[in-house]
Amino acid sequence: MDTGDSGPFTCVVILSVVGLILLLLLAMYAYQRYVASKRPIQHLCDYCGHMVNVVSDCHHAPVKEKFLHGICRDCKKECRLVCARCKRPV
């Protein structure tokens, strides 16, 4: 049985693999939070049947989307989401 010096080498390899996985997860988290969230989300309009961007019902301006409502980028108040084409609620 040869115990040799393979113990410290194995530990370094395992720690580097775990570090690489954590770095990859951190990069994916940062991409999702800062890059992918800036893209406009499209919704299926029940009335016109198209995939559309949503706008606010008050000024028909772009919105910052929250769950089931949005914040109008024009007046900074909460608003409902409406279709950009037919102006009906999404």
Image (cartoon, rainbow, N blue to C red):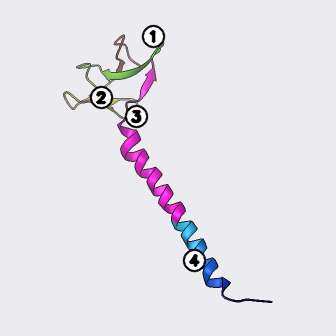
Q: Which residue is mark 2?
A: 63
* Secondary structure of residue under mark 1: loop
Q: Nearer the viewer, mark 4 or mark 1?
A: 4
Q: Which residues are magenta?
A: 20-45
Q: Quadrant of residue 16?
A: bottom right
At label 2, the amino acid type is: Val
Give me the C-alpha separation between circle 4 and circle 2.
49 Å
Give the left or right position of residue 46, taking residue 35 as reference: right
Q: Are marks 3 and 1 in contact (CB under 8 Å)?
A: no
Task: Return the residue at label 1.
Answer: 47
Image coordinates for residue 22, horizontal then vertical, percent: 50, 62
Q: Earlier in the sequence, mark 4 or mark 2?
A: 4
Which numbered mark, 3 or 4, is in the foreground of this view? Answer: 4
In the picture of the structure, the residue carrying the numbered disc 4 is 12
Q: CA distance from mark 2 to mark 3?
A: 12 Å
* Marks 3 and 1, the one that precedes in the sequence: 1
- Which mark is first along the chain, 1 or 4? 4
Q: Real-space Cα distance between discs 3 and 1?
A: 21 Å
Q: What x and y, as percent, mark residue 85? A: 36, 12
In the rendered image, which residue does mark 3 sit on? 67
Q: Comparing marks 3 and 1, which lies closer to the viewer?
A: 1
Q: Amino acid at mark 1?
A: Tyr
- Picture disc at residue 74: none
**What residue sits 38% from the left and 39% below the top?**
37
Foreground: disc 4 or disc 2: 4
The one of 54 and 25 positioned closer to us in this rendering: 25
**Vertical placement of residue 9 versus 44, above or below:** below
For residue 43, side relative to residue 58 (left or right): right
Q: CA distance from mark 1 to mark 2?
A: 20 Å
How many numbered discs, if any? 4
Callout 3, which amino acid? Phe
Q: Secondary structure at mark 3?
A: loop
